[in-house]
Image (cartoon, grey):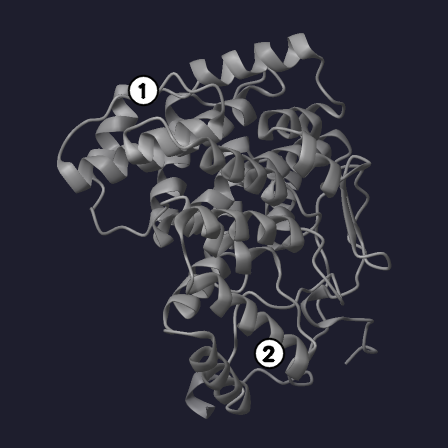
Amino acid sequence: MGAAKSKSGGLAGIVAGDSSICLCGVEEQSLRYRGYSIEDMAANASFEEVAWLLLRGKLPTHYELETYRQELQYKRDLPPELQHLLEILPGDSNMMDVLRTGVSFLGNLEPETDESEPFAVADRLIASLGSMLLYWYHFHETGKRVSLDTGEETLAGHFLHLLQNASPIESHRHCLDTSLVLYAEHEFNASTFTVRTIASTLSDFYSAICGGIGALRGPLHGGANEVAMDLIARFDNPDEAETAIRDMLEKKELIMGFGHRVYTTSDPRSAIIKQWAHQLAQQAGDTRLFPIAERIEEVMWKEKKLFPNLDFYSALAYHFCGIPTSMFTPLFVMSRITGWSAHLLEQRAHNKLIRPISNYTGPEAQAWLPIEER
């Protein structure tokens, strides 16, 4: 057996490549997209601006942004064949499976070719993922085929309008837009690395994105906000929550929405979405859920020095926007498609097949035995 090779469980701390897209600042606990801080973007940028920045490497001018929004509006509609497919998918399908299947089928209808514009598939998916999910959702909820023309300028507004069949409350639209900015990109996370690995084989755009959706479907990557919402909603008051959380910790149960593989003291995105959750809770007249969430946060820090990550208060923000819990992780996809696409294109621009090695832990060399001697 050869000498043991350097290894790390889950590739923790391993530098797997170069990228100019995102910096997760471990020492300063910060996050930047192409040099711009997450705080500045959350306060000033729309999701469409961030999508342009991630894909094209620079901020759009006023004209470019307006033109881009118009282009995305045009690309929200779905081909009749895809609408039919969404109608025949089971109504109890996992929503991540609906998105994965929709993306794969769209790849058959509108395949990527050598003549495709560089950002064509990325922009098409950014524009249409919400339409895919909500067309399927409404058809199986009501049996009706909904119009995908909402007239909304932003993707956040489009999603909420389609979901609620009405123009959304402005604070809800703004909150969701900010959330999409916060979820848009996060360096070499599991789903992004999956996308880059598939892209490194020179596979097509749609195949790589389907891989990303599959990776995000796993509960250790996506889905924490759904579990967090279920946890928060379980209790009647903060004292009950504190007692239960301490009991869960004593039993060493996993509490989702806390801690992070990169950050050690705080998630820079968490404070931003917590402010939104607080604001929307006040608007809704909530006196139960937000105080419960804060008490859980306090206990987790006091007992385990674990901080809430983006998922924890995103759950409450989405809840107060009227978004069903089962749609929380699909919304993650609708945002992270921007980061995935940017990494896919970056991988292609400087491609080398991603092929790590393993540390063999099997038996020593063995002599082959004829079947009658086994």
What residue is at 76 percent from the left and 67 percent from the top? 265
What residue is at 34 percent from the left and 49 percent from the top? 324
Q: Quadrant of residue 89?
A: top left
Q: Position of residue 199 (x, y in %)?
A: 62, 38
The front one of 139 and 300 is 300
Q: CA distance from mark 2 to mark 1?
A: 50 Å
Badge 1: few (under 14), some or many (20 or more) residues near its Cα, within 10 Å?
few
Residue 19 versus residue 25 in the image, above or below? above
Q: Position of residue 84 (x, y in %)?
A: 22, 28
Q: Quadrant of residue 130?
A: top left
Residue 336 can be seen, yes or no: no
Instruction: Name the outermost residue toward the left.
Output: 143
Going by the numbered disc 1, the residue's amino acid type is Pro
Q: Quadrant of residue 106?
A: top left
Residue ID for mark 2: 299
Q: Is residue 221 left or right of residue 140?
A: right
The front one of 136 and 182 is 182
Label 2 with label 1: CB-CB less than 8 Å: no
**Element type at mark 1:** loop
Going by the numbered disc 2, the residue's amino acid type is Val
Q: Position of residue 175 (x, y in %)?
A: 52, 39
Q: Disc 2 or disc 1, which is closer to the eye?
A: 2
Q: Is residue 181 left or right of residue 111?
A: right
What residue is at 45 percent from the left and 23 percent from the top? 111
The front one of 58 and 280 is 280
**Which of the marked residues, 2 or 1, is nearer the chain's N terminus?**
1
Badge 2: few (under 14), some or many (20 or more) residues near its Cα, within 10 Å?
some
Q: Position of residue 148 (x, y in %)?
A: 31, 22
**Element type at mark 2:** helix
Quadrant of the drawing holding the N terminus: bottom right
Label drawn at residue 79: 1
